[in-house]
Amino acid sequence: MSLSSRTVLAASISAALYVPTASSESNNETSVQQMPTADQCLVAESEQKDINSHPIHIKADKVTAEADKQATYEGDVIITQGARKITADSITHKPLEQTMVAKGDVNFRDTQVTAKADKITTKLDTDETVMENTQYQFLCESGRGEAAMVLKSGQKVYEMEDGSLTSCPEGDNTWRMKAGSIEVDKNEEIAYFYHTRFEVLDVPIMYVPYMTMPVGNTRKSGLLFPSFGLDTKDGLKASIPIYWNLAPNYDLTTTINYMERRGTQLDANFKYLTHYGEGFLRSEYMSSDKRSDNDDHRWGYTFQHDGVINESWKVKIDYSRVSDVDYFKDISSNVGNREDGQLIQSGSAAYRTDFWDMELKVKDFQILDNTTSTQPYQLLPQFKFNYYLPDFYQGVNFDLISHISRFEIQDAEKPSATRVHVEPGITIPFSRPWGSVTAEGRMMATHYEQKFDSKTAGNALLEEKVTRVIPEMRLHGELNLERQTGNYLQTLEPQVQYLYIPENDQSNIAWYDTTLLQTDYYGLFRSRKHSGVDYIQSANQFSYGATSRFYDDGFKERMNISFGQIYYITPPATVTNEDGTSYSAWAVETDFNFNDYLYYHGGIQYDIATSSLQLGNSTLEYRDGNNYLQGTYRYVSKDYIKQNVDFVDDNKNTYTRNGISQAGVLGGYQISRNWHTEMQYFHDMSENIMLEGLAKLSYTSDCWFVGFSYSQQLRDWKDVGNFDTPPEYESNFKFNIGIRGFGQELGSGGSTDNALGYGRPFYLNN
C-alpha cells in the first residue's frame, strides 16, 4: 500500500471514530492547512487566537483503534493543531481524556518553543504538556537547555526538573545554569532557579540556593548575574547586582562590590519617572577601606532630577558629594559630574512663556583638589529675568536680559559680592536668501556691592560699591553666494562685523563667574571675549572672514574652510601691541570628508606680525565600519599662555616650559566576527613624557564576552618646578567577563577611567 493510501486510511478511521475531534489531512494541495515556517516565533494575532480551537490533523503510516478508548498511530506520525505540531514514531490518542502520548524520537513545536524528547504527553483541551528527557529551544527569545522533565502549562509557563538553561546557541556549552528545579514564566519574562549551579565548560564554579533571571526585555526583581574583574589597584573584584522592580515607574538596583585590597562596597541606584520629571539617586558606601590611611567610612552619592511641569515650569537638580578629596583617585565611581577638579552641586527652577522667562538658580561645588589655590564662587542664589518682544515696531526686536546674583566663597582672602545686571537691547534684522544684515545696540548696566579684606594684596583696587554702565553697538553683514564647479556645488559666505564697546576702567571689580572664552574663527564674530559680565572688554574693531563649502551631487557637505581676523581701530588694553600691529592673528578652520572613510579637521591661529603660531589643532581619521585609525595633535604657544591665562604666580615654568605640544594616536580593529581590539596613546612632546596609554582586547560571542585592558595614566608630578623629577603613573590591568542573551548583557566589559579618549571633532553638514 502506498504512503498516500495509508495516510488517507488512517485519517479516515480516526475521523469515523472521533469526529469532530480529529479531521483528515490528505496529500491533496487544496486541503493542506497553511502552516508557518518551522521554528518560527509567532506573536500578535497568531497568539491571540486560541490554539486549542483549531482542528486536529493526523498523518501516519499505520493506525490501530479501539472504539471510544484510544487510537494508536505508528510510522512517521505527524499531528498538527494550528501552530502546534508533534512528530513521533508512535502516538496514542485517548479522546475521552483528551490526551496525546508521543513516544520514540518525539519532536514538539508551537508558537513559543521547540523540543525533542523521549516521551511527550499533551492535553488537547488545555495547553498542558509534559516532556521527558527533553532538549528544548525557545523561539521568541534566546534560551535553550535540557531537562529530565518539562511541564508546559499555558502558552508561556514552563516547569523543569533537573534542568539547564543557557543563551548559547546549539553546540555551544560555554556556560549554563543547572538547577534541581527551574520555573520559566515567559508571560512575566522571568526564570526562577532552585539549587542552582553555574557551570563554565561543564565545570561548576558557583552554587546559589535560589536566584531569578530575566528571560526577556521586561524588568524583573531578582539576583542578576555577577561580574568579575582584576586590576592592579584593587586586586580581585566581584560585583553581585540585585534588581528590585518596585513599580512600573521606579526601580532600584543594589550591587555588592568586593575589592580584594579594599573591602566590600554597597552601591544603590534608584531611578524614577513621574509626571513631574525623571531622575535618579545613586549612592556608594564602604564601611572600611583597608588601603585608606584613616580606615574611615568612604561614601559618595548623586541626586539628579530633570522635570517639566505644565509645559512651563522646568526644574533641574544636580547634587553630588563624596566623603573625601581622594575618593575618585582611589575608587572607580559613577558618582556625580566633575568639572575642573570640582563636584557640581546645583539646582534651578525656571518658568517660561512665549515672551518672557525667569529662573532661580543655586550652584555650589565640592573641591576635590587641595593643592589648588583657586576656588570657585558659590552662587547663592541667582535670579534671572529675560523679556523678548520681537517686531515690536516696524521690524525692530527688543529684548531685556537681567539677573541678580549673590556670590560667596570659602576663601577669606577673596571678596564676596551681590551683583545686579540689567541689559536692554534692540536688534534690527534684514534677511534675504542671498544674505543678511543685523544691527544691534545694547546698554549694559551693572551694580556691585562687594565685601572684602582691603589688607589683602589682591583686593587693593576693589571698591565696596561700584556702578558700571557700558553701551555696545554691533553691525553684522553676511552674503551667501554659490556656483557649480565640476561635480561640486561651492558656496562662498563672506561676513564682516563692526563692534564698538567703549573703554571702561573695571579694575575695581573682582571676577566672580567670568572666564576667557575659547578663541577660534567663530569667536571672531562674538561681541564678548569673556563669559559673564564682570569684565566687558572694550572694542573698536572690524571682524572679517569667509567660509567656503563644497557639496556633492547628493548635497552632502564634503569640505569647508573658514578664515578671518580682527582689525583693531583702537586696540583694547588687554591686547598686546609690542610690534605696533593693529591686527589679530589669522584664524583658520577646515573640515574634509573623502568618500566617507577619510576625515580631517584642523584649526590654527597664526600671528603674521610675529610670524608665530599661537594655537593649532589637527585630527585625521580613517574609518571603515568598526575599524578606525585616528591621529590628533594640539599646540598652544607659551606666549599665548602668558597673555591669556591668569597664573597663580609669575613662574610660568611651574606649568610649562615650551607651551603645550601634545600628540595622540587612537585605533580600533575588528579582527574577526568575535575579536576586537582598541588602543590609544597620548604623548607630551614639550616635556617628552607619556600622558596616557591604553590597550584593549575583547572577545564577544553569541552568549558571553570577555575583555582585557592595560593602561598607564599620568597621575602626579609632585615636584612640578623641577622637570628632572620623573612623573608618577598609575598602571591598571583589568579583566572582565559576562554573559549575553535574554535581552541584555550581564557583567561589564572592561572599561577604563581614562581622562583622554576617542572623539570625532568633524563639523560637516551631513
Image (tube, helix red, strand yellow):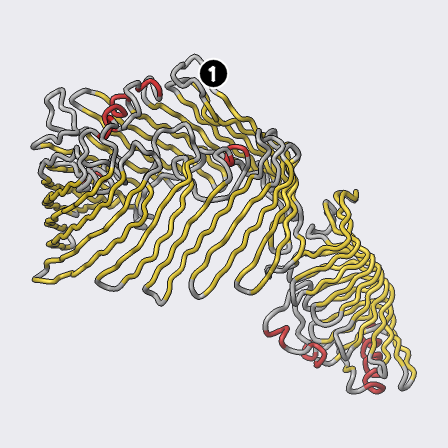
Q: Is residue 166 left or right of residue 7?
A: left
The residue where tag 1 is placed is: 726
In the image, is residue 274 above or below residue 535? below
Image coordinates of residue 217 in percent, x first then y, are 59, 59
Q: Can residue 389 be seen by looking at this rendering?
A: yes
Image coordinates of residue 710 in percent, x first then y, are 57, 29
Q: In percent of the image, x 27 and y 28: which residue is there?
A: 646
Q: Nearer the viewer, residue 62 or 301?
A: 301
The N terminus sits in image quarter: bottom right
In the image, is residue 30 above or below residue 148? below
Q: In percent of the image, x 90 and y 83: which residue is there?
A: 69
Q: In percent of the image, x 17 and y 29: which residue is there?
A: 574
In the image, is residue 219 above or below residue 440? below
Report the label total.
1
Q: Amino acid at mark 1?
A: Pro
Q: Is residue 373 left or right of residue 288?
A: left
In the image, is residue 33 above or below residue 276? below
Image coordinates of residue 641 in percent, x first then y, are 27, 25
Q: Is residue 422 left or right of residue 309?
A: left
- Which quadrant of the view contains residue 640? top left
Q: In percent of the image, x 48 and y 30: which residue is there?
A: 680
Task: Give the residue at the far top of this rendering.
Answer: 724
Q: Nearer the viewer, residue 522 or 88?
A: 522
Instruction: Please rate how many residues cluster around mark 1, counting C-alpha atoms within 10 Å: few if below 14, some from 14 to 19, many from 20.
Output: few
Image coordinates of residue 682 in percent, x first then y, are 44, 26
Q: Secondary structure at mark 1?
A: loop
